[in-house]
Image (cartoon, grey):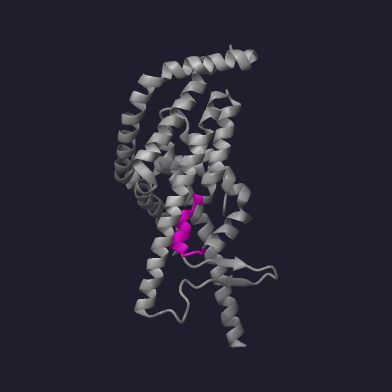
Amino acid sequence: MVLPAPAYPVMGVVYLARNIQLLGPQFIRSLAWALGVAVSTITPLIALTFKSQQKLITSVIDTAFPRIAGMKILGIGIQTWSTMFLTMGESSLLVGIIMGELFKKERSKGLFQTVLNKEGNVHVGPLAQVTENGGIIVSSKIAAGDSSVSSRLHHQQHKIMDKASASTSHYGQRMGLWLVTLPLNFVPVAGPIAFCYLNGKVRSRYVHRQYFDMKEMTQKERDDWIQTRKSQYTTFGVIAQGLELIPFIGILFGFTNTIGAALWAADLERQQYELRSRKLRETNNAASM
């Protein structure tokens, strides 16, 4: 059964806690790399810019939002919270630039596949879809007439080039949007919410990129898949973005969000397995008549 999208980021945290022996070594290695880059980035960033940015944000709030200037959350002033979110956003941007999308993908790829393979209980197969008239179609990974070794190699080369191009484009878009929307964190409360929504909505299209790669889906199939589940992917992306923006522990959520996405993919693949099985039964029944 596929759960509501907001449940999966939470399930990622629970799953890591329950399976720390299985995921521990891999998770610790990945986390160590990320923490090393983050600490070497955020420490000088805080030391050099935190006080000056806090003064600027305090001035903005006192001038533009005097009614909330004295507001405190958990005993901490709204000005300090806004500064922390802004600093974490700046740090995340720098970490993203330093680590790069490809580096991050390689560090999370094994984690995603480990969880998916353990929880899916079925082999990830080709895309199965229900048509408007209630029928089921199952796409083939490679056309029947394209089975020669040279054709397969040519097919794989094009796939690799397309993936590299898409990854570079995605990385540039994410970093560009992050940089443009970063000043939103100057605005208390509403600013970080808008920041998470805009960046989370963009990242929602890439939550299951690895899953789609495993199913060898075309770009149109990916677009159609996401469009039919648009609100679910947007919700997941926004929540995941918000968790990763939490000061000091956001990096941890970066990995648990990957686990949550894999658990979601496992539930979706169970549905896919059922559709492929139904299609096979229909084909066998038609052949026996």
In the image, is residue 134 above or below residue 64?
below
Q: In this rendering, would 3 be left or right of 99?
A: right
Question: What residue lies at 40% left-to-right and 21% top-to-bottom?
Answer: 49
The foreground one among 63 and 87 is: 63
The reply to whether residue 245 is in sight is yes
The location of residue 228, given as percent across then percent down, is: 63, 56
Q: In this rendering, would 131 be left or right of 14?
A: right
Q: In this rendering, would 214 be left or right of 34?
A: right
The location of residue 277, given as percent across then percent down, is: 54, 71
Question: What residue lies at 53% left-to-right and 34% top-to-bottom?
Answer: 181
The location of residue 21, given as percent across then percent down, is: 32, 44
Question: What residue lies at 45% left-to-right and 46% top-to-bottom?
Answer: 172
The reply to whether residue 6 is in sight is no
Residue that sits furthest to the right in the current view: 133
- Residue 128: image quadrant is bottom right
Magenta-drawn stretch contains 207? yes
In the image, is residue 218 above or below residue 200?
below
Quadrant housing the C terminus = bottom right
Question: What residue lies at 43% left-to-right and 61% top-to-bottom?
Answer: 162
Q: In this rendering, would 132 be left or right of 146?
A: right
What secondary structure prevails in the magenta region? helix
The location of residue 81, given as percent across then percent down, is: 50, 21
The boundaries of the magenta stretch are: 206-218
